[in-house]
Amino acid sequence: MTLPKTLRWPYSLTYLGLVAERITQAAWPLWSVLFAALALWGLGVLAALPTQALWLAVVVLLAGGAYGVWYARRLRWPTRAEALERLDAALPGRPIQALSDTQTIGGTDAASVAVWRAHLARMEQKLRAAKAVEPDLRVAGADPYALRYMAVLGLALALLFGGAWRGSDLAAGLGAGAADALPAGPAWEAWLEPPRYTGKPTLYLPDIAPGTLEIPQGSRVTLRLYGQVGALAVTQTLSATPLPDPSAVAQDFEVTRSGSLTIAGGEDDQTWDIVMLADTVPSITIDEAPTAQPPSQMEMAFTVVDDYGMEIGRAVITRDLASTDRRHGLAVDPDPRAPLSLTLPLPISGDRADFSEVLIEDVSKHPFAELPVALTLEAEDALGQIGRSDTMQVVLPGQGFFDPLAHALIEQRRDLLWARANGPRVAQILRTLTHRADDTFADPSAFILVRMAIRRLEANADLTSEVQEDVAEILWQAALKIEEGTLENALEELRRAQERLSEAIRQGADQAEIDQLMQELREAMNNYMQQLAQEAMRNPDSQQSQNQQGQQGESEQVTQDQLDQLLERIEELMREGRTAEAQQLLQELQQMMENMQVTQGEGGQGQQGEGQQAMEDLRETLREQQGLSDEAFRDLQEQFNQPGQQGQQGQQGQQPGQQPGQQPGQGQGQGQGQAEGQQPGQGQQPGEGQGQAQGGQQPGGAPTAESLAQRQEALRDQLGRLERNLPGQGTEAGDAARDALGRAGRAMDNAADALEQGDLPGAIDDQAQAMDALREGMQNLGEALAQEQQNGQGQQGSEFGQNGQPQQQDPLGRSQGTTGRLGTDENMLGANDPRQRSRELLDEIRRRSAEQERPEQERDYLNRLLDRF
């Protein structure tokens, strides 16, 4: 058969592939043995073997070659027919075979002949799509251990790193005479290895001509002498310690000064004049004095310059007694306190020899906060040299407390941390602050915390450092509750932020100050919206009436995007110099925020209704627990009152929300109402509180400790029933809610035991823990139910529930369902700075890599991480 032109090229390639396939399958053992022999030859393995082992290796290679030749007998050269058969099998319908066939019957029938010709035409058409068939070069079945690849790899290594000809070595190994070996004389090698932190390469001294050479301080010199001992000698003046034996085979020393290195012997003496480059001390400067960044962070810029780079940086802060106003609580001598040391951030990547960074730390809770201090920065390099900046006298920034009561508590906390001797004075002033609690404290929990601080100060005549720190933490938490825990404070903070921004616009402040004030405004806005939503949870009845009144008139929803666009528009107007329009938009924003309220709707059906009921039950449990805590605290106050002071009971021991002149058994409903967002007198009359609803009271209306313990146990049983029927099981937030309620139950058990034993202070502490756990459980439950609602298990729709009522929303109109969950799944307030976290991780990796006692493998791994990042 004559091949068409379209088939010639595919046929030729297929034939060549078939040839390669036959050769590969037949000759792979032969070329594998050949490659292995060349690899052993080129790498010098044969020359390094002893004589007997060398002869054995040669015999093995010859046997392998013989086997390869025997295996190659399978080689059969492909024929033209085999190539055409393979090509034809790859085409549909086997057109090559069809074109070589002849018509056996119907040759005289014109119709049959026409059909046959059409068939041949179609086969010729298929030949045009013919392509060469790839050969099958796989021999894995015959070589399961891939020995052929090992031979190829060995040959590649021999070509790259081995000698081109090792015939002389092989001849010597096979028994050549000593006269054929090359004469060998004394030789030497030397390496100059700079310290690793310099990043400079190791120098190979034989490749460097004698002369002047500069190397870093701390470089290590390593020498190896070969030949007859004593033929070579080393002389050096680079180290303070002389060499014990100048002719020793192995020598090494560290360069500590400039000098010379001489290697005597051999043909000529060689001398190098070594100049040691001293490692300079790091230089660090403070670019800007520390400034306060809201809400409680300190920010300070600094610059570091070093020849090879800083390893560790610290900010050391000590008291500046000379600049301190030593009056009032600071008049006494302060307790000894260690300096405050802050780790300076390092660049995440790049050169650390010359850089500028910003230290951002929260030191608002430290005893030095808001006091004059001496600030010094330290920079340490890898050699251990420490450079220090000029000492700066500043006032250490802390957290600003604008509420007068919170500021007073923070001032007493400062005096207590100044000296333990201030304990009695602080307790006396705190008693003064709690004299008229109903006029001073708007948050009952803050009042309870302050009374706990007073009790602990008065119960410890000799104040220890542990009690000092404990009371300081209690006062800090109380001040935070007063400063940030009320809607009025949040609104006042928002107003102050808006007023500061408005004043800055009027005075034409620079852009940096405007940006800072805009950030304060955003944070104040977020805080106000959170407090507004929490107020709606605490007082749903009052909020519902406000919503109904608002629905009768006109109402408008404001989304987060709209607020962000409004703030961006204000910034744009200020950049363009259109201050009047910016002021107008700022006033509109202020009115919008002050008139904002939470919208609520009725619960849906099914799981959402069960979730709403569970939330309401938990709120009621929290109210009852707050009432029990208030009654226990009043009993504790009565125990503190000495005979003759009962007339002051209504003043000194008065609870928040209790009217002057009220009896201890009255006011429970009012105090509780205020704690949960209810106005005094709303929903119940004085004397109708929980204190009178239960029996077992002492004469005069004061409940006994036994009755309080019984009520606490009943409340614990009620919480247990709620915990067993809690929805949201199986979800992360639902499990977290159960865990929080479990902790609340254990705290209630401890409180009941303490009440039975008459330990009122311990009972109050346990009740406070139970209330905190209840609040956490309510928040987690709200998140769990909101997730179920988003997954289609709760209410349908984005704006209205199944009954047509609008769903509960936060001040920005974001859906809450009826669970009290605030906000969205997005992290609206941000998180820890990822750049700061990256710096901390890199600093920790550098610290560990510098510890020589760690295993070598671990330090190598850490250094690879540092090289990569």
Image: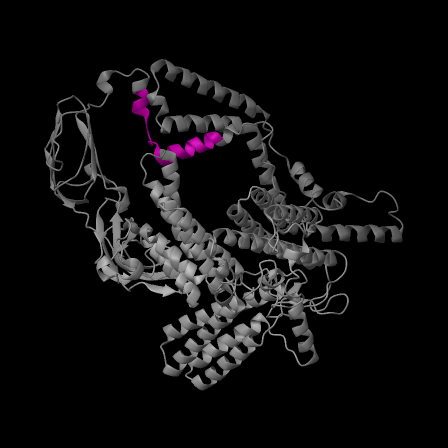
Q: Determine the residue positioned at 21% across, 40% down.
A: 219
Residue 122 lies, with reference to residue 403, above or below; the image says above
From the viewer's side, name the closer residue of 263 and 146.
Answer: 263
Question: For this view, does 866 lie left or right of residue 614?
Answer: left
Give the image location of residue 489, x and y in percent.
49, 69
Q: Determine the residue positioned at 61% across, 49% down.
A: 708
Q: Determine the residue positioned at 54% across, 55% down.
A: 634
From the viewer's side, name the closer residue of 531 and 243.
Answer: 531
Outermost residue, top side: 52
**Render colour scheme:** one colour
Residue 387 lies, with reference to residue 141, above or below; the image says below
Question: For this view, does 367 lie left or right of residue 695?
Answer: left
Give the image location of residue 825, x and y in percent.
59, 60
Q: Which residues are magenta?
A: 150-171
Visible residue check, residue 830:
no
Q: Is residue 356 magenta?
A: no
From the viewer's side, name the closer residue of 680 and 374.
Answer: 680
